[in-house]
Image (cartoon, grey):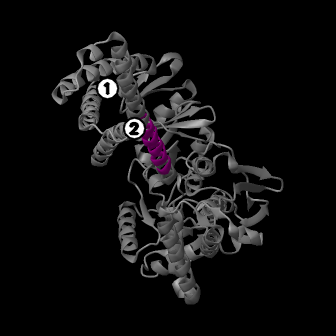
Amino acid sequence: MKALIVDDERLARKELIKLLEEHPSIEVAGEAMNADEAEKMIEELNPDLLFLDIQMPGRTGFQLLESLDSAPLVVFTTAYDEFALKAFEVNALDYLLKPITAERLSEAVHKIQDKEKTKSGRPRDKKLDLEDQVFVKDGERCWFVSLANIRLFESDGNYIKVYFDTNRPMIHKSLNALDEKLDERAFFRASRKHIINLSWVEGIEPWFNGGLMVKLRGGDKVEVSRRQAAKFKDMMSL
Amino acid sequence: MVNKTRLYWTLQIGGWGVYAAIQILTMLLASGSEIRIQRLFFFVFEAMLCLIVTHSYRNYINKRKWLSMGLARLIPNILASSILMGILIYFLRIPFSMILGTFVPSNAFDPEKMVTGILYYTFFVFLWSVLHFMYNYFERYNKSLQLEASVKEIELSNLKSQLNPHFIFNALNSIRALVDENPAKAKQAINQLSSILRNSLVTEKRGLTSFDEELKLVRDYLGLESIRFEERLKTEFDLDPESKDFMVPPLMIQTLVENGIKHGISKLTEGGVVQIKTKVDGDHLKIHIRNSGKFVVNGHKKDTGGGLGLENTKQRLKLIYGDEASFRILTEKDNFVLTEIIIPHLY
């Protein structure tokens, strides 16, 4: 697995690299000093795993994750930010407290390997599919959400409302930009305002003006515009 | 409580004892050789009678909680009861005069003498009341002062700066890496960290510390942060040699320097400078802490806790020095934040 270490302190990075020498399955592909550097390196190296410090000059670790289209596996490394990590509703992440102990690191590495195994080994293209996860932050609360769990994206001004479980946090993105990133086999642009997850579709009814009304599991109803309706019928009949 | 009871009896017995002694002395001086043993007994008895009456009076006062009564009600009550006690004493001494054989009915029941006699005792009971209430009021005031002082102390200890755990763990993490890279520097860092930890434990118990000691702590602190930030942190000192004569609240300068690093340097990719400058002006010490960065007044980031820390520092200065000390923080041109404390010399 390719890992990227993101920490503003040289000694902290050095210490972690030294500790990771014990784990040949993790290959440290690069080190970044801040979020900007990290963002570039993620683009270039496409790492599977981030060791990420939260407090950094410039953007924080959270802000870095928010700017990424899809989040790789993340292990937070922090000296004393447990309060920040408590923000996570779903325990989809691990964190290491500095100074990091070898035992604790081994545990984290095992967890990561287990998670990696559940992923299919098929080559990744740039599109986001149901196996990818995104990082969402809404005020103090944070989530790593698998795209498979997101049933609906709804445009709301400059933001997108993300529907999963009972949560509807907002992300600062345009629906068009998101639409381009998403795998069209899994997600469908229902209208100017909505993108739906096809695996969540429960029922379809004809609607006014030749449009359709799609019912999603969980009860949300989304209108498919007339222009998109024909395309939708094609897709669903496959 | 035991002490209070003992004090009461000492004053009560002592007071009426002195009263009796003065009466006897006056009699001796006035009547010369003609000492009448009956008179002597009478004065002793009179004092004892007054003691018993005022003691019962005190029990009554305590029972009816006169101490918490308003003055407008209390004064008439005291006057009335003083007259009542006066009458009581006047008539209670009659049986004893009879026993001693000094009782002269025409004398005792003469209206004019009766009024003078009653007023005489009334005066003493009144005087007793005044002393009694004055003592209790004073004690109560004293207690409220003590309470105020202890409240102040608790407030102060709550406001006292504490070492930031984030700093401690980051320092330990850096030291861990240094052990391989530069063992000598790692050893030095452990000394600096232990000195800071020791200091922060000891200062818990102290209200003020000498400027030099605080400065040493700040230097240790900056030494450790330099390991962490490396070339991103530069420090400058410009100190007035007279600063050492001043006492400062422990960890106060350290906290402000730490604030400067936390909100200034650590937010800057390129890092910056922390500068500590002191100037003695008469009997005031002016401390300037400058750091690269910008001061955001109650920015939308509440989680940084900076506002609370500064508010604590302000309140702490106020509790220790009243209006004698001043504190301000502002952004200077060229992206520098200046924190200024002025504290007086405490003798």
Q: Quadrant of the C terminus of chain A?
A: top left
Q: Nearer the viewer, residue B273 or A16?
A: B273
Q: Residue furthest bottom?
A: B184
Instruction: Give coordinates of residue B253: x percent, y percent.
Output: 64, 62
Crowd rating for badge 1 (residues with CA inside 10 Å; few <14, some 14–19, many 20+): few
Q: Amino acid at mark 2?
A: Thr
Q: Nearer the viewer, residue A224 or A151?
A: A151
Q: Which mark is residue B266?
A: none
Name the chief secondary structure element in magenta. helix
Crowd rating for badge 2 (residues with CA inside 10 Å; few <14, some 14–19, many 20+): few
| Above or below: residue B222 compared with residue B327 | below
Q: Nearer the viewer, residue A142 or A68?
A: A142
Q: Secondary structure at mark 1?
A: loop
**In this rendering, would B159 be left or right of A97?**
right
Q: Is residue A115 magenta?
A: no
Instruction: Give coordinates of residue B304: x percent, y percent.
Output: 58, 51
Q: Nearer the viewer, residue B127 or B253?
A: B127
Q: Quadrant of residue B94?
A: top left
What chain letter is assigned to the residue under label 2?
Answer: B
For image coordinates 37% across by 22% down, the residue present is B122
Q: Residue furthest right?
A: B333
Magenta residues span B136-153
| Above or below: residue B207 compared with residue A186 | below
Residue indicated by mark 2: B26
Q: Residue furthest top?
A: B111
Q: First in sequence: mark 2 or mark 1?
A: 2
Q: Nearer the viewer, mark 2 or mark 1?
A: 2
For image coordinates 65% across by 70% down, the residue present is B215
Instruction: Give coordinates of residue B149: x percent, y percent.
Output: 49, 47
Residue indicated by mark 1: B65
